[in-house]
Amino acid sequence: MGYFALGDGAAVAARTYLGHYYGFSGEYAKHVISGAMKSRDEVVEAIGAFSAAGCDELIMFPCIADPEQVDHLAVAANLKPGSTQ
């Protein structure tokens, strides 16, 4: 499972969303926030790391409530929107 926020304001959006959701967990919240993917490079790196660990399915959760986040993720991961690759 991975959290992501891409585009303008991604870092702030991820910190705000995940900080609110995991705020009760103290240090764990900082860990989750720091692991959120906020750029194309981070998406590519995370997908590669999960794949290297044997993961063949990865669930990605957007930190920004905007359907365009799915398109941003598809571009970052070199997939076309609607693709099943």
Image (cartoon, rainbow, N blue to C red):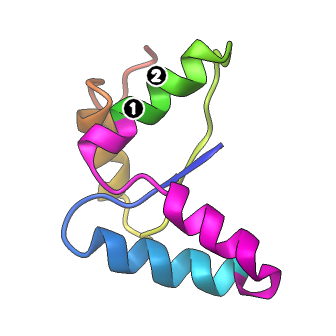
x then y, percent, for residue 10? 31, 69
**Apparent side of residue 13 relative to residue 34 in the rendered image (left or right):** left
1 lies above or below 21: above
Please indicate, yes or no, whether residue 7 appears anywhere in the rendered image.
yes
Which quadrant: the N terminus?
top right
Q: CA distance from mark 1 to mark 2?
A: 5 Å
Q: Amino acid at mark 2?
A: Gly
Q: Residue furthest right?
A: 25
> Residue under circle 1?
45
Q: Tell me, yes or no, whether the two marked residues, 1 and 2, touch with CB atoms within 8 Å.
A: yes
Q: Residue furthest left?
A: 8
Residue depicted at 64% across the width and 23% down the height: 57
Disc 1 residue crowd, few under 14, some 14–19, many 20+, Cα 10 Å: some
> Residue under circle 2?
48
x then y, percent, for residue 45? 39, 32
The label shown at residue 28 is none
Comparing 38 with 82, the one in front is 38
x then y, percent, for residue 47? 47, 28
Residue depicted at 49% across the width and 84% down the height: 16
Report the span colored magenta.
23-43
Comparing 71 with 55, the one in front is 55
